Image: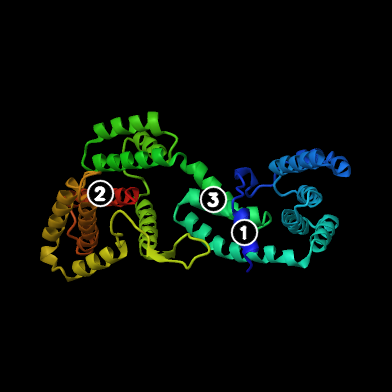
Amino acid sequence: MSRSVLCIVTLCLTVVIGPAAAADKGDRETATALLSGVDALLAKGDEASLASAAEICKRALAADATCPAAYLKLGQCQEQANKPREAFKSYKNAADLAKKENDSLVARKATFASEKLGTGLLQIGEADQKLITKLLPLADDALADDALETARQIYSKILALAPAHEKAMEGLGKTEKAIAARGDPVKAKIAAAMLAEIYYLVATGDKAKAAKVAADMGERYGDTGPGKEAAAMLANSFEPPKNLSAEIAEAKKVLKEQAKKATVKKPSAAVGTTPVVTPVAVSAPPVDVDALEKTAMEDAKKTPKDQLLAAFKDAFAKGKDSFSKATPGTEGNQQSLRAALEQFIRCESLYMRIEEEKLNDTAIAAMQKQASTSRYSCMKMTILAH
């Protein structure tokens, strides 16, 4: 690839399309109305008229970034202004968008105009496609990793190169929705830490203090996801979810995803260089809930019948002790959470054996209910810490 083509590609990457140019079609009626005066300016052909015409085309694209006619007329402005490379790019965008809308007339005009500029400029389109091939996986990975600002930037650059690129439009749409749902990332992070504290306080029996923290969150961070979750917990008087088993299963899925992201290696975001593979950093080792459950189940099966109750009470006591040391924000918090989770999972497996052997009583059942709730708190706190 020639140095001049690389320069053009670099220049293309500096174009940033805002959220309005994402997945949704814009205001075509406004764009069409704006374009009505462009032909007269093109007919004048002087520098000032061409500049005005180009500005009108850009305003039309701001109203509807998928308008083929706006790109076609912008290309005509650029061609008359002796900017063939920019014109070629605009004509190509016009042709791609027109084909998508089955507008054969605009597609033919744009294709003919781009071909007229010379076959040498076709290298630009080829370079764009190669660059898009590199950029799209990076954008998808960033979105999957919740690196939303990075995802938005890369998808926007792809759409600057190819406004009709369906996957980029879809990805940018998802990214914008995720950003809107997340809100201010700093606020969300603080709110997540406060929500973890609420789970800790509830599990340790201090619902009064949990209520104060939840009320504070409602005033300061009520518009965040954690803030809404805290409000729901407060409205429910911090009682365990009615569908606790389903909530535990959902938390387990989230932990699996976190573990997967922690172990999968991803390429660096550098474009035009050899990808450097590095592991994704996390704040604490991932928790393998499946492995903990498997070990607990095997141990429970091996436990003699006459030792089941003692083993259950021992696991429950150890779980409570570890959890008491898992105050959010303290050193060793995640290690204590993992140790507590392991013991509460042991309680669950042992309790299944206890029921099978018909050894259950009211006190053991109450302890198991608390162990199950505490397990859920451990899992939620682990999720919120990442």
- In the image: residue 253, left or right of residue 112: left
Q: Residues within 10 Å of mark 1 (few under 14, many from 20)?
A: few
Identity of the amino acid at label 2? Ser
Residue 191 image offset from top left, x and y in percent: 36, 39
Residue wearing tag 1:
7
Q: In this view, does 227 lie above or below 275?
A: above
Q: In this view, does 252 lie above or below 204?
A: below
Quarter where residue 84 is shown: bottom right
Q: In this view, does 39 lie above or below 353?
A: above
Q: Which of marks 3 and 2 is nearer the N terminus?
A: 3
- In the image: residue 328, left or right of residue 249: left
Identity of the amino acid at label 3? Gln
Badge number at residue 31: none
Q: Helix, strand or loop at disc 2?
A: helix
Q: Which of marks 1 and 2 is in front?
A: 1
Q: Residues within 10 Å of mark 3 (few under 14, many from 20)?
A: some
* Contact? badges 1 and 2 (CB < 8 Å): no
* Contact? badges 1 and 3 (CB < 8 Å): no
Badge number at residue 153: 3
Residue 286 image offset from top left, x and y in percent: 31, 59
Badge number at residue 374: 2
Q: Which of 80 and 313 is in front in this view?
A: 80
Q: Helix, strand or loop at disc 3?
A: helix
Quarter where residue 112 is shown: bottom right
Residue 54 image offset from top left, x and y in percent: 76, 43
